[in-house]
Image (tube, helix red, strand yellow):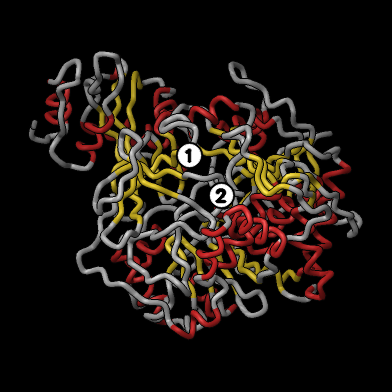
Amino acid sequence: MVTQDSSAKTYAPDEAFTAQAVGQSTLFDDAEADREGFWATQARERISWSTDFDQTLDWSNAPFARWFVGGELNVSYNCVDRHVEAGNGERVAIHFEGDQGDTRTITYADLQQEVSKTANALAELGVGKGDRVAIYMPMIPETVFTMLACARLGAPHSVVFGGFAADALRTRVIDAEAKVVVTTDGQWRRGKPAPLKATVDEALAVTEGKEDADSVTNVLIVKRTDSPVDWVEGRDVWWHEFVDGQSAEHTPEPMDSEHPLFILYTSGTTGKPKGILHTSGGYLVQNAYANAVVHDVHPETDVYWCTADVGWVTGHSYLVYGPLANGATQVVYEGTPDTPHQGRWWEIVQKYGVSILYTAPTAIRTFMKWGDDIPAKYDLSSIRVLGSVGEPINPEAWRWFRDHIGAGKAPIVDTWWQTETGGIMISPLPGVTTLEPGSAQRPIPGIKAEILDDEGQRLTDPGAVGYLVLTEPWPGMLRTIWGDDERYKDTYWSRFGPEFYFAGDGARYDEDGNIWVLGRVDDVMNVSGHRLSTAEIESALVSHPRVAEAAVVGATDEMTGQAVCAFVILRSEGADAGGAEGEELIQELRSHVGKEIGPIAKPRQVMIVPELPKTRSGKIMRRLLKDVAENREVGDVSTLADSSVMNLIQDGMGKPAS
C-alpha cells in the first residue's frame, strides 16, 4: 500500500509551460457544463470520420455502451494515411532501436506503405472483417505494422505478451478463435536470442488432454534472430517472402464506431483470463485526447517515448494508437534497460532528444537502486514531461524521477487507468495541476470517479479508505468480456449496483481532495505493472506432481510494487521435504510457474506449509497469508475453521506465533 510521505512537497505548474500546454483549465469547465457535448467536440476535432455520428452516447442498454452512434471511421487511416494526406509524410513516426544496436527510421509515408503491404498479405491469407488475429511478437516495427493492418481490415487483434508461455498463448488463441498467428523466429533478450516460434508450435500442437487451437490456418513469421524453426508445411509463412512483395497500396474500409478493434486478455480472479473487448471510435477518441492533454504532445516538435511493451494495454493505447493518431514522433525500443549497460535508456534519450518519457515506477525504482551517477553521464536536457503508469508511485521515487531525469523541473503525470478503462482516467494535467508526489490526483476532464465505502456511500473525509468507482460511462471503456456478457456484468457492475463501475482498487482522498490509489482489493496482483491472477498461478503450482494445494498472495515489494508469494501443501509422498531437498523443490516450483505462465509470474518466495488457513466454508483467508508474507502481526483469526493453522505456518517458518 502506498502512503503519503510526510516530507512530500507540492509543485505548481510553471507559467511558461502552462502558456504552451495542450491541456488547459478550460477543459474542466467545458466537460462539467456538457459532458456528452465535450466528448463530441473531442471526437470531431481529433479524429477524421468518413461518416459523422448522430448520437454521442447510447446508454439505454447499460452497462453496454455505444459511443458516437452511426459514425464510421477507420482507425488505421486515422493513425497513418491522414498524416500523409496532410503533407506530413516525411515526419518520422518511429525511431526504432533494436536490442542488438540496429536502428530503423520510419516516416509516416513509410508506415503507410508497410501497413498497406501487411494488410494485403493478411487479406491474401484469408483474414477479413471480423476475423481475429493473434500477435505474439517482440517490440519491433512489424508488430506495429500488424496491429495497424488488422485495424485497417477490421480484423480484431489479440496481442499476447512475448514473455507468456505456450499454455497461456494457447488459452488466448482458443478463446478468441484466432485465424492467423503472427510471430517471429525468436526475440532478443539481454543480448541473447530466445525462441518465440517454438512456443507458438507448442501452443498450437495437438496435445492429449488439452483443447486444440484448430481455428488457426496460418502462422506468419518475421525473421528476427535467425533462430532455427521447425517448419509446418502449408501453415507457416515467412514474412520476408510473403509480405515484402505485396502491393504498397491499400484502401482502408470505413468501420462502424462500435466495430471491435482488439481483444486484450487480462488476469481475472478465476483461472481463465478475461478477453477485454475494445471498439474503434470511442477508444481512439479517448486515447488521442488523453495522449495530447496529459502527455502534452506537440507532434511538430516532440519526441515521445512510452517504454511499455505492446503486449500490455499501455503499449496499445500510448505507444500505438494514441500517439500515432496524433501524428507524433516516437521511440520504439526492443531491449531492456541494462543491455548492454545500465545507461542504455539515457543513451537513447540523448540520441533522439526525447522530450516526453512515460514509464513505470518499477523501472524508476530500479534506476534509483543503480545510482544517480548513471543518468548524470548523459544529456537529458531535452526532457520536458515525465509520466508514470502501471501502479502507484511512491513519493521518494517520484521526486528522484523529477530531480535526476527531469532536471528538477519537468512535471510528472502520475496516471491511473486499467486495461478495462482503455485510457487514462485519473491524472494531473501538466500545465494546470499543482502536483503532489504519489497521488494520481483528479479525474481528467470528461471522466467521473468517486470513492465509496462498503455500503456504497460516497466518502469525502480525508484519509478514509474505500473503493474507487467510475460513475459515468466513458468513450474508451471496455464493451464486454469476449464471449461472456454475464461475466462482464458480474465482474465490473455488480459490486455497488449497475450505475457504478468498480475498478477493483482501493483509494482515499487527502486533505486537498486528491485521490491516492492504494492498490488491488481483489485477488489480482500488480507485479511491475503487470496484472497477474492468484488463481492462475495457484493452478500452475497445483499442476506440479508434488503439490496438493497452493495459495498465492501479492506482498508489497520495494522494486516491483507487489511480488508473488506462494504457500504450498505437498502431496503425502513428499510432505516432509526439507533441507537441501526442500530448497531444490522450491526452485523447481518457481521454474514450473515460469514455464506454465511466464517468468513474470515466478514466485519471489515459495513456502512449504502443513495446512492453509480456511474458513468453515473452505475459503482460503489470503489476508492472513499476506500478513505472514509481509512479516507483520497476523490479523483476526476468529473466522478460521481451525485457528491453530496459523501457529503451524508461523512455527514452520521460524516466526513467532501471534
Circle number at residue 371 = none
In the figure, is residue 657 to the left or right of 316?
A: left
Q: What crowding class fits label 1: few (fewer than 14 Cα within 10 Å), some (14-19), or many (20 or more)? A: many
Foreground residue, 526 or 441? 441
Residue 501: numbered disc: 1
Q: Is residue 59 above or below residue 529?
A: above
Point out residue 455 in the picture as x, y percentages from the top left corner: 32, 33
Q: Residue at x 37, y 62 (%)?
A: 366
Which kind of residue does numbered mark 1 sit on?
Tyr
Q: In which quarter of the image is residue 327?
A: bottom right
Q: How many labels does the image show?
A: 2
Q: What residue is drawn where x is 54% and y is 27%?
A: 487
Where residue 211 sits in the image (x, y, percent)?
Answer: 63, 20
Amino acid type at mark 2: Val
Q: Is mark 1 on a helix, strand or loop?
A: strand
Could you tell which of marks 2 and 1 lies nearer the N-terminus?
A: 2
Is the Cβ of the residue at disc 2 closer than 8 Å to that at disc 1?
Answer: no
Q: In this view, does 479 lie above or below 308?
A: above
Compared to residue 346, the image places residue 512 above or below, namely above
Apparent side of residue 605 relative to residue 165 in the rendered image (left or right): left
Per the image, label 2 sits on a secondary structure element best described as: helix
* Residue 563 seen in render: no
616 displayed left or right of 299: left
- Give the x, y percent position of residue 311: 58, 48
The answer, for residue 76, to whether it is visible in the render is: yes
In the picture, which quadrant includes the C terminus?
top left
Mark 2 = which residue?
A: 313
Which-is-in-front pick, marks 2 and 1? 1
